[in-house]
Amino acid sequence: MALLQISEPGKSTDPHNRKLSIGIDLGTTNSLVASVISGEAKILEDNNCRLIPSRVLYEQSQILVGNDIPNHALTISSVKRLIGKKKDDIDADNIALELADSNEIFIQTPQGYKSPIQVSSDILKKLKKIASDYFGDEIYGAVITVPAYFNEGQRQATKEAAKLAEINVLRLINEPTAAAYAYGLDSKKEGVFVVYDLGGGTFDVSVLQFNEGVFEVIATNGNSSLGGDDFDQIIKNYLINKYKFNSQSLKDQAKLNLIAKDIKEKLSSQDTINETIRFNNLDYQIDISLSEIEKLFAPLLDKTIQCVKNALNDANLSTDEIDGIIMVGGSTRMPTIQNHIKKFFNQNLLNDLNPDEVVAIGAARQASVLSGQANDDTLLLDVTPLSLGIETMGDLVERIIPRNSTIPIAKAQEFTTYKDGQTMMKIHVVQGEREKVSENRSLGEFIVKDIPPMPAGAAKIKVTFQVDADSLLTVSAEEKTTGIKTSIEIKPSYGIEESEIRKMLEDSFTNAVNDKKFRSLAEVIVDANQILELTEKAIQDDKQLLLESEKSTIERCMNNLKSEITKKNTSKIKLATDELNNASMSFAQKRMDNSIYSSLTGKNINEINK
Ligand code: AMP
């Protein structure tokens, strides 16, 4: 039966229906919100600030976020490091947060205990408000970015935070994928890209493969405690050693950190620094050259290069197989980093966009596509990694959404009853490429009840599979005569690892021939059993229409078919089924004549012609 294309969620056919969408880079230190305005992705500012510190201050009567927080206030920061984690997952001693007794993480605030999800949701609320204030309108939905290494729990927690902030999440996307969107790499046919992301406190490297419209993260590596701050430390130590800056107190240390950071950032645009720095009422005359400092940076750079090598190794790729290198994170502004990476890959870098903003820009572009505002051709959507279908008679899978289908997607197919008078039908949803139900992943099941009793094959149950932009699958079944609908929601990606998907695909290739044989056999057995059941019932109901000789021929054919079914030879079962069909043909004809006769009995010719 042909598959039907029903609708694509998130798409509006009404050109006047304004669906404002935003991209959110929910960062550890800073967050950003962007939107596509007149075809161009733009960062939305909060009182002229583009970066919104991911910090929250809970006071008795108010919650302040980001730039609204007064200087030096003690705030909750870096909550992204805790989201989706349990107390057992973290080194609680290193975290200056109060933890409640359970294994859940809670942070004590003047407004009571707050979970990382609640804190993140307060940051998200602020970002949403920046956008709705900018547009003076409601925000339809957002794409939120998460690190490629985030597990299902961390992703789910991020979504919960968004839900609490009343944000309609169009999709979560990986940060490196967003960066690739920002550079429009999805307009290419295919390619392999490296995203080098060096921020203030963390370093991530990802290898992305772009194929058939989809980015797949094929390897990640990094160091969660390596970033711009470490470069600041090197300069700070240099100032202490060479110029004898004296920083005893914690406050002095903090001040010196800022001086070091300033020097580092200046050295990204000038080769030397020649200036007097006033520190603790003393003047220090400094004369620093970039080349001198670059030598000190070398060990940190080598660490990042080692991570890049590991990622390439995991992806089984060499540097000359890489089609582009995207630079993300404020620290990639350092010329020494750019030169190193350029040399390592022996090619120019993708670094024209602001490295702090590239992730939010990519997320905004993707949000614009998912909300139906952009031209579909500009960005391609994600796909289903494995096929989705339901169990049918004979332990067989009927695939409804084939693997690699672009999402969001909705497809429907009609199914019918197997037996006369059947009033219930089990819908067992499975995922995978194999023909046999048990070789696939079972995702869930539900029962369609109250099907009106009808002859086998007469009932019509429309089963609809709908996968939204977040890969959430809704399966619904509608009995056409009563219109009664039953449905379930499933997250097909839940609990499945990339490696498992690969293995399932490999298994389907290696078993392709056997699977085909299995399907052919199962299908003829289903047909054969159905004919056997129908014939048995017909003999029971209308045996008076049968001559003894006919009856014994039919019974011989039935026994032969039953015995062939046990031997499991496809062509012999087919042959035996045809024999039974032929043998019972005149019986079937007699039954039909008889039923026509009885329906006409007692009526005159005028009534019949009516
Ligand atoms: P991010 O976490 O991506 O916002 O990056 C923050 C880090 O980028 C901090 O360590 C900054 O000092 C660093 N950074 C920002 N601008 C520059 C620059 N021009 N040169 C060197 N480092 C920079």
Image (cartoon, rainbow, N blue to C red):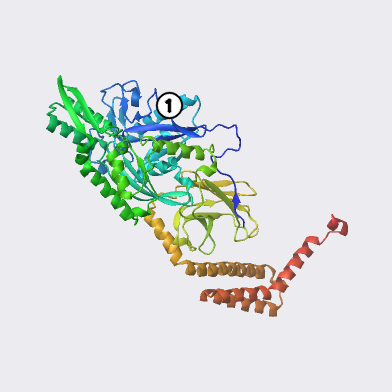
Q: Residues within 10 Å of mark 1 (few under 14, many from 20)?
A: some
Viewer-nearest residue: 481 or 184: 184
- The residue under label 1 is 130
- Figure quadrant of residue 442: bottom left
Vertical order, 336 against 286 (above or below): below
Residue 160 screen position, x and y as percent: 40, 37
Rendered residue at 19%/40% (across/down): 296
Asked if residue 209 shows in the view, the reply is: no
Viewer-nearest residue: 381 or 49: 49
Name the quarter showing ligand 1.
top left
Vertical order, 34 against 226 (above or below): above
- Figure quadrant of residue 340: top left
Residue 125 screen position, x and y as percent: 40, 29
Vertical order, 110 against 483 (above or below): above
Indicate the quadrant containing the N terminus: top left, top right, bottom left or bottom right.
bottom right
- Figure quadrant of residue 356: top left
Local SS, label 1: helix
Viewer-nearest residue: 361 or 425: 361
Residue 66 screen position, x and y as percent: 34, 27
Q: Does the residue labelled 1 lie within 8 Å of ligand 1?
A: no
Asked if residue 579 shows in the view, the reply is: yes
Residue 523 screen position, x and y as percent: 56, 67
Viewer-nearest residue: 15 or 379: 379
Disc 1 residue type (three-letter): Ile
Q: Residue furthest bottom?
A: 549
Rendered residue at 31%/25% (across/down): 58
Indicate the quadrant containing the C terminus: top left, top right, bottom left or bottom right.
bottom right
